[in-house]
């Protein structure tokens, strides 16, 4: 069951402020502060109790020594009071694993690696990233501090920052591990214990908070939400997806993450920033078009919006920033009635390899990124799942490259297919934990061998090589090859060596090169050309399952060969001939569908903003490139009474063709919402 819905227009107001800066809060005026927010259509703002420097921004009886030494006036209580008078929520920020004051005064509470070194910023580098251990007495400080905040302030929510698993070897962790019968010298055991520790900490802290405040929102931030959050989701009231596209997250992290997080049953919030780059980028501005895209895309995925800002030390928020925020949040406010309570309408479930390979900021599984890019460009409606998800809601499951199948998952997949579901799998998906055999006969293939090894004896299958040393070729044909010439297409990463069973239909073969590229034999600058010899199946079909021997999703993420996308979209066409949405717009048009069940309508979001690599380090959006006369078909579950562009309430003529409502949208200026009302 969902907690109360989150507010749509939020700010996270960072305030990590050095003790070397004086006159902190000297320019703060509570009414000016809250008025500026209200004018900018903000209805929730996360403000600071305690920052990464370790300083408090209120008068503390419990820990007066931690009050910022140059704080001219207590900011937090005045921020809360002035905002509450205007109906603005104020969740409270508390740092957990990064706290420079504590790290300096209690070095014995710091987490240590297996060599006994502090984890995080070394002593002669700038930064407060030394990691504190929540198994140390620091936890008791955190509780007393949290209790004081809850006692002192009307608390709408608590945002605990930096709460992630640490493979700690400090004395407290070593003692606890030994007591639990775990071997602390073993790195894998420390990793396991680190995850158990942080989950137990979250449960413990939520229990502690709930005894004092049964209603406030609670979130523990780690910069990423993924399958490791499923077992501990009870400690959260909602998920905030920290994913600043101009920061280390990039533009792909949000869709990958929200498509998973929203399936866990809690309301989701997307976080971006007003910064040109990322947190702490003072006096910089995000381009308006980019901020529009980032917030409107959150709506399109059924999430609420949050923009990160950082308060200047004087305590006065920047009116120019809030003009920018106000413009975007004005548009969000107008569109909200078509987004409130909206749930994504999807039909494809993509299993995430993160469950098997791990994931965090900057290390999302490449196959999942490739699948997300490819399906979004194809206009498909999909969620990201793990093996514990309910598969029955989906028409097709996609297992990209690295979905390990144990006995339990194998049976679940077989039941899903027996019940009418379809599966697309690739490369190592379907192999058991030993990676030496397929755990299921669903895909109609058997492993023929491990495939070639490099000169050090390591398997080369699935790995990228700069000069495509182990490239092979795929020859499309028939329906799977629609739109592609029936000739060799390079598959740069070596696929799985497989053979097809008797009832398996080979849709396209793999054609080998003359030889692999090594110092013993090579040809030209890159991969060796085709020998023309078919060596094994490349794409096979058995009933409602299609299997690709190549790591086609990782390959698409590497360098986006159009043929890889076309082959997967063709496979989907075979298994899902009537997808939810089709359009004739370009591959840069993002299309999502949501349902407002209470209002008896679906909302189609059409988003067209193009992130461009205008610099060495990041993607930038400056322009809105309008699209004209886009034809759209939506497969509707019942008869449609009215199609309209909202909130403008401009009726759109439509006709019904089989299961589809068919219409044309005159113009898309970045974002258009179309409501399809049933009845
Ligand atoms: Zn520890």
Image (cartoon, helix red, strand yellow):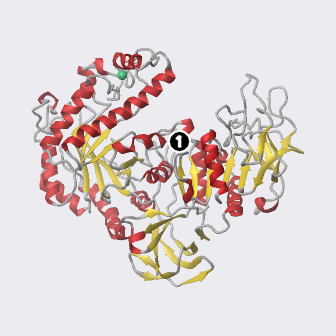
Q: Which residue is mark 1?
A: 364
Circle 1 sits in a helix, a strand or a loop, which is it? loop
Residue 17: x %, y % from top left: 23, 36
Residue 59: x %, y % from top left: 10, 37
Q: Quadrant of residue 99?
A: top left
Instruction: Report the front residue among 87 and 122.
Output: 87
Q: Is residue 370 visible to the viewer in this orientation of the structure?
A: yes
Q: Is residue 423 above or below residue 451?
A: below
Residue depicted at 26% across the width and 23% down the height: 137
Ligand 1 is found in which quarter of the picture? top left
Residue depicted at 12% across the width and 35% down the height: 60
Q: Is residue 637 above or below residue 349?
A: below
Q: Is residue 313 visible to the viewer in this orientation of the structure?
A: no
Instruction: Report the front residue among 638 and 610.
Output: 638
Q: Is residue 665 above or below residue 310?
A: below
Left or right, 320 with reference to 367: left
Left or right, 140 with reference to 289: left
Callout count: 1
Residue 387: x %, y % from top left: 55, 45
Residue 288: x %, y % from top left: 39, 59
Q: Is mark 1 within 8 Å of ligand 1?
A: no
Q: Quadrant of residue 219?
A: top left
Q: Is residue 200 above or below residue 170?
A: below
For the N terminus, which image quadrant?
Answer: bottom left
Instruction: Report the front residue among 446 and 535.
Output: 446
Left or right, 521 with reference to 285: right
Mark 1 Cα-neighbour bin, 10 Å: few <14, some 14–19, many ≥20: many
């Amino acid at each position: 069951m969902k907690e109360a819905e989150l507010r749509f227009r939020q700010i996270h107001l960072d305030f990590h402020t050095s003790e070397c800066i004086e006159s902190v809060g000297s320019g703060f005026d509570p009414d000016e502060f809250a008025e500026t927010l209200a004018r900018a259509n903000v209805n929730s703002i996360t403000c600071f109790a305690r920052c990464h420097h370790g300083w408090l921004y209120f008068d503390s009886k419990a820990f007066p020594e931690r009050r910022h030494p140059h704080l001219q006036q207590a900011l937090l209580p005045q921020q809360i009071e002035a905002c509450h008078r205007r109906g603005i929520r104020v969740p409270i920020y508390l740092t957990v694993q990064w706290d420079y004051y504590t790290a300096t005064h209690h070095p014995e509470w710091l987490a240590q690696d297996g060599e006994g070194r502090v984890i995080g910023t070394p002593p002669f580098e700038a930064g407060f990233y030394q990691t504190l251990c929540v198994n140390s007495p620091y936890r008791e400080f955190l509780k007393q501090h949290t209790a004081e905040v809850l006692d002192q302030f009307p608390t709408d929510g608590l945002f605990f920052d930096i709460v992630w698993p640490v493979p700690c070897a400090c004395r407290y962790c070593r003692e606890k591990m030994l007591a639990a019968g775990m071997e602390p010298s073993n790195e894998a055991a420390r990793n396991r214990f680190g995850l158990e520790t942080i989950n137990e900490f979250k449960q413990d802290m939520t229990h502690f908070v709930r005894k004092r405040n049964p209603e406030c929102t609670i979130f523990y931030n780690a910069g990423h939400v993924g399958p490791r959050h499923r077992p501990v989701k009870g400690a959260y009231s909602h998920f905030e997806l920290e994913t600043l596209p101009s920061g280390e997250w990039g533009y792909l992290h949000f869709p990958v993450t929200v498509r998973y997080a929203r399936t866990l049953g809690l309301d989701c919030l997307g976080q971006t920033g007003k910064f040109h780059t990322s947190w702490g980028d003072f006096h910089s501005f995000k381009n308006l078009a980019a901020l529009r895209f980032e917030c409107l895309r959150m709506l399109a995925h059924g999430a609420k919006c949050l923009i990160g800002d950082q308060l200047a030390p004087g305590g006065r928020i920047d009116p120019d920033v809030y003009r920018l925020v106000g413009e975007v949040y004005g548009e969000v406010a107008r569109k909200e009635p078509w987004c409130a309570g909206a749930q994504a309408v999807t039909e494809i479930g993509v299993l995430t390899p993160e469950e098997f390979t791990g994931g965090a900021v900057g290390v999302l599984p490449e196959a999942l990124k490739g699948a997300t890019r490819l399906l979004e460009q194809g206009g498909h409606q999909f969620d990201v799942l793990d093996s514990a998800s309910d598969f029955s809601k989906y028409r097709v499951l996609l297992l990209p490259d690295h979905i390990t199948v144990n006995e339990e998952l194998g049976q679940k997949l077989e039941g899903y297919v027996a019940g009418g579901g379809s599966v697309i799998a690739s490369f190592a998906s379907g192999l058991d934990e030993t990676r030496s055999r397929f755990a299921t006969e669903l895909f109609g293939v058997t492993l023929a061998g491990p495939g070639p090894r490099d000169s050090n004896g390591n398997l080369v299958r699935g790995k990228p090589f700069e000069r495509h040393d182990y490239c092979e070729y795929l020859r499309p044909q028939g329906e799977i090859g629609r739109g592609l010439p029936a000739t060799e297409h390079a598959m740069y990463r070596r696929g799985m060596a497989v053979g097809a069973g008797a009832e398996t239909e080979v849709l396209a073969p793999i054609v080998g090169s003359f030889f692999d590229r090594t110092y013993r034999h090579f040809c030209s600058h890159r991969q060796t050309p085709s020998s023309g010899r078919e060596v094994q199946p490349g794409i096979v079909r058995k009933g409602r399952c299609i299997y690709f021997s190549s790591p086609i999703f990782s390959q698409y993420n590497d360098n986006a060969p159009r043929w890889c996308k076309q082959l997967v979209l063709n496979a989907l066409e075979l298994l899902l001939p009537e997808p939810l949405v089709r359009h004739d717009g370009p591959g840069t048009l993002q299309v999502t569908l949501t349902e407002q069940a209470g209002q008896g309508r679906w909302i189609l979001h059409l988003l067209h903003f193009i992130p461009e690599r205008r610099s060495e380090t990041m993607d930038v959006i400056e322009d809105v490139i309008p699209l004209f006369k886009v034809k759209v078909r939506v497969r509707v579950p019942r008869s449609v009474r009215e199609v309209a562009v909202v909130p403008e309430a401009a009726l759109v003529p439509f006709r019904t063709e089989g299961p589809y409502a068919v219409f044309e949208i005159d113009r898309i200026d970045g974002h258009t919402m179309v409501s399809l009302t049933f009845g």
